[in-house]
Image: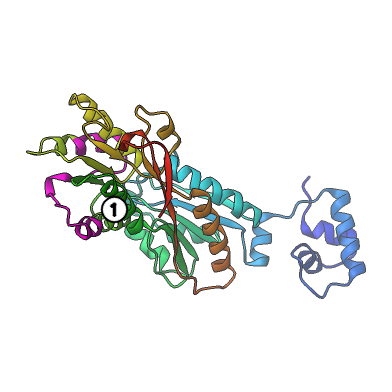
Amino acid sequence: MSLTIKDIAKMAGVSPATVSKTINNYHGINEGTKKKILDVIKETGYQPNFSAKSLATKKSNLIGLIYAGKVNVEFTHPFFNEVVTAFKKNIGLLGYDILMFSNENFSQDNGSYLARCKHFHVDGCLIITGEEIEDSIHDLVNSEIPCMGIDLVLDGPHSSYVMTDNINLAAKVIQHLYLNSVRTIGFIGGQPNSEVTKLRGRGYLQAMNQFGLEIKEEWMQYGDYHEDSGYAAMKKILKAPERPEAVFAASDLMAFGALRAIKEAGLKVPEDIRLVGCDDIDACRYSSPLLSTVRQDKERLGKLAAYMLNDLINGQSKLKPVFIDSELIARESCGNAISKSKV
């Protein structure tokens, strides 16, 4: 038979309220009384009921993990998998567990992230960006529940976000190609309404204008950050009357799709078209040719998200967004030996 808090109180000769206060580290309990209660707990192997403990402390030590959007990146995506791994490690060290929320059939069910977060008494939420963000995300972000976004702008009263400096990231790619005598450059982004695509597209356009390089609409195509969409986008670029000397894809997976389309067209990388991706996933080191890319600091993104969310949970409500530096890794696909440069 499982023990209750009343059983422990009876064995220790105290009230259930005193046992509850001891378990939850309340001040004002006599040291002798506290020792007597803790000795009984140790001898009996008693485990406090989670629900009772969370009600007493007003904290569940649970963090909700949400992959937002009708088109979401899912936990298998190489970039976000590494970011979430870093977040999981650091939020665990701060004393939290993670509860993942599904959004399958979400719009059809008229479900609510806010209602589910309240049901499970989560202390805060980590929200990973996707495409076509649900309205329910905005309801959650504008609630009293602390929320931290990764690559997703959050402006709620108890929210903040961490993001790579995407404008500078894209500009660095164009600068690198320009310094290597490339003057015609295409761009493959995610969905046009994606915040990350908007920022990387802005960086691309600003740098192209800065160097007086021609911008052609047919050289700017869009996908969904996955390989097949990069393949389709690159095929459209290749159908243009002229082809660019280089293409910058806003994700490595789309760059791999673009590489497949280029090879199918009987062209070579980097001899005919140079190619640069973004994320520096492990596959970049094994592709043929080796893929040039921009490395985002995934460990730092995850760690900062954990510490900032913990601060939000503990009452710090004025945390400004943090933008992280990145690093261009020039490999074979842009015609360079492996080199690194900071953004």
Lateral position of residue 288 relative to residue 38, left or right: left
The residue located at (22%, 30%) in the rendering is 262
The image quadrant of residue 61 is bottom right
Q: Residue at x 21, y 32 (%)?
A: 272
Front one among 336 and 218: 336
Mark yes or no: residue 200 visible: yes
Query: For the magenta stretch, what is the residue range?
Result: 205-234
> Which residue lies at the image location 55% right of the left edge and 73% below the top edge?
316
Question: What's the coloring here?
Answer: rainbow
| Quadrant housing the C terminus | bottom left
Horizontal side of residue 114 vs 169, given as left or right = right
276 to 93, vertically: above or below: above
Question: Is residue 214 highlighted in magenta?
Answer: yes
Q: Residues within 10 Å of mark 1 (few under 14, many from 20)?
A: many
> Residue 287's x, y, as percent?
38, 29
Amino acid at pointer 1: Thr
